Image (cartoon, rainbow, N blue to C red):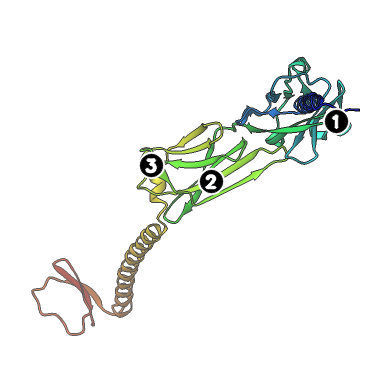
Amino acid sequence: MGLPSDHSRPSLTSHARDLLTSLVALILLRLGSAQLNVVGPGHPVTATMGQDVVLPCHLSPQRDARTLEVRWIRDRFSETVHHYRNGQDLYREQMGAYAGRTELARDGLSVGRLDLRITGLRPSDDGLHVCTVGDADAYDEAIVELEVSATGADPHLSLGGYEAGGVRVLCRSAGWYPLPQLLWRDARGQHLSSVSQTHSQDQEGFFEIEGAVIVTGSVEGPLSCVVRSSRLQEEKESSLHIAAPFFHNAQPWMVALALVLVLLAVSIGLSVYLFRKQGKLAVQGWSRGRCSAGTPWVWSGAEPWPREVRRRRTGMFSWGCQRP
């Protein structure tokens, strides 16, 4: 009985190799089909407060996403913005702030588009949104940044009184998002430094900003307050012209000095008047008391002046009385 021929071994080895190659190809094909790649826009999506916005997201390469689970969440935490699975929108886990405001674009699911529409934008919608896609075999996600903006009211200018040798001017504007910048400019376009600046945020998320500046007489022409949104590249401006008399009153020491000088002049004048009045009354009183037994007379200056005569000179004549 002879031994098996060696010619059968190469055939068995070739068959095993073909089987292994087919198995590897099948595994790779299945892995490739199970792989998910989610792509976002690659740049922030900007929108204005109160408007609607669409957050784009899609699968690459393109494939049918109707049988996948799609969930939009906030900031990588389990705060559900919108949930889709097995052809249905699920609202049980949706955040209350998004109730009735979201919609997944169904017409794009068949080609792998997972766009989310949000209506009536609010300040709270600003930030990161995550588009997640998965099935039993794979999962992937993409981040979409939403930038919400709102332009506020025209700045309101008002005078706040005198301070530090100048006039304090206030500027206030509300209804902005995000927090804007407040700048002061003179008539030549030069920036002025604020002495104070504060801001607050209301319950809806809108910002109000207020600033103050001290304006002296060296500032010529109108003063402008500019409130600017760096996100929208928009600004609003209001101007105010301060009349020159305001700056004269802005120097309290000058006002006090002028008042002191006026009072001093009045006091001196009154003192001189009273002194002269008192002297005249004294002479008249002496004349009535001392001349009651004598005879009044007027002396022209030619005859000798009696020793016992009190006199008062008026012009070129003197008068007095002489004892009998």
Does 248 sit above or below residue 32?
below
SS at badge 1: loop
For marks 1 and 2, give the CA distance.
57 Å
Q: Which residue is mark 1?
A: 136
Q: Residues within 10 Å of mark 3 (few under 14, many from 20)?
A: few
The residues bearing labels 1 and 3 have C-alpha atoms spaced at a distance of 64 Å
At numbered mark 2, what does the secondary structure look like: helix, strand or loop? strand
For image coordinates 56% across by 39% down, the residue present is 180
Circle number at residue 53: none
Callout in the foreground (3, 2): 3
| Looking at the image, residue 258 lies above or below residue 104 | below
Q: Are marks 1 and 2 in contact (CB under 8 Å)?
A: no
Residue 28: quadrant of the picture: top right
Task: Give left or right: position of 311 versus 3.
Answer: left
Q: Amino acid at mark 2?
A: Gly
**Residue at coordinates 84% horizontally, 21% vertically from top-left?**
67
The residue singled out by tag 3 in the image is: 190
Residue at point 10%, 80% (across, down): 304
In the image shown, does 81 or 159 lie closer to the viewer? Answer: 81
Q: CA distance from mark 3 to mark 2?
A: 17 Å
The x, y position of residue 113, in whole percent, is 72, 20
Q: In x, y percent, where is residue 135?
A: 83, 29
Assign a secondary structure to mark 3.
loop
Which residue is labeled 2 in the image? 211
